Image (cartoon, grey):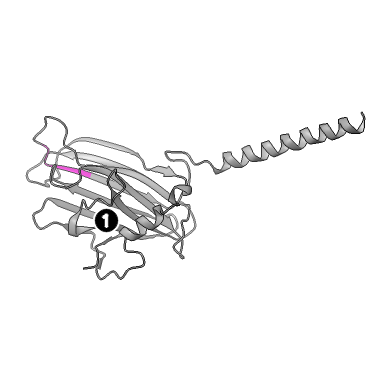
Amino acid sequence: MNTSMLRLAGAALSLALSLWIAAAGAAKAQIPSVGGGLTPYLVGEFSFLRPLADNNVTAIENRYTIHNPTTKKLRFLAAPFDFSGEHADILGILMTCWTGELAPNGRSFLAIAALPGFLPVDIGTFKIVALDGLGRPEAGIVGFQERFIYKGDGPLGLKNVVAGSRSNLASVPDVALRNGELERIKKVCGEGDVITDLTSSREAESEDGSVRIRTGGGVIRRPAQ
């Protein structure tokens, strides 16, 4: 084999090796869209829409659970947004952000029950981001969401489940947190601002009884007045 053929074969081998390394790196970087992968960013949906032609529904409840299956201690921020990307003030004075710490192998949950048609935004997204001690995105969370429809004796008489669903929170690659997305979530949660009211209450209810929130392993954060 002459020198030119050896050079050509070497170049071909080098190109094949480079393509293989690039493909392997891309495959490693991919995160499944639903479950099965650790990411700093989860997205779910909230919906308080009453089933069509059913006026007997007395409450709709959305539940979210975040798990930290790692050996690292993490913080998390979670806030609701409408489909235009703006913060959805679905909970009024009760909550603008759900936040807390996740111990290694720890979990946190949030349950929101509301009277159908009461909230100003009926449907949108819940954005959840995990952070390290310096406030940087840190992969290490998975999560689930559930939705229950109730019929009971009163606005939030949580009795007689007539329908329910459960699904994974979508795992989103951390590249989606660039271009201001992380800052948007931090702003809603008051990161960098003085928060005058932090409550660790495990349950809160609006004055008229139309909205009820329960949390575990996290806190309800209300905006500074």
The kind of secondary structure the magenta stretch mainly shows is strand
Quadrant holding the C terminus: bottom left
| Residue at left offset 77%, top offset 33% | 12
The verdict on residue 10 being magenta is no
| Residue at left offset 87%, top offset 33% | 6
Q: How many marks?
A: 1
- Range covered by the magenta-colored residues: 57-61
Instruction: Tell me: 59 left or right of 221.
Output: left
Instruction: Tell me: 53 left or right of 218.
Output: left
Residue 197 position in % (x across, y down): 24, 68
Q: Which residue is mark 1?
A: 215
Q: Nearer the viewer, residue 130 or 110?
A: 130
The verdict on residue 60 being magenta is yes
Q: Nearer the viewer, residue 204 or 32?
A: 32
Residue 201 position in % (x across, y down): 23, 63
| Residue at left offset 36%, top offset 59% | 186
> Can see residue 217?
no
> Can see residue 207?
yes
In the image, residue 162 sits, relative to residue 95, either above or below, namely above
Instruction: Tell me: 86 left or right of 101.
Output: left
Q: Quadrant of residue 206?
A: bottom left
| Residue at left offset 23%, top offset 58% | 95
- How many residues crowd mark 1 within 10 Å: few (<14), some (14–19), many (20+)? many
Residue 190 position in % (x across, y down): 32, 63
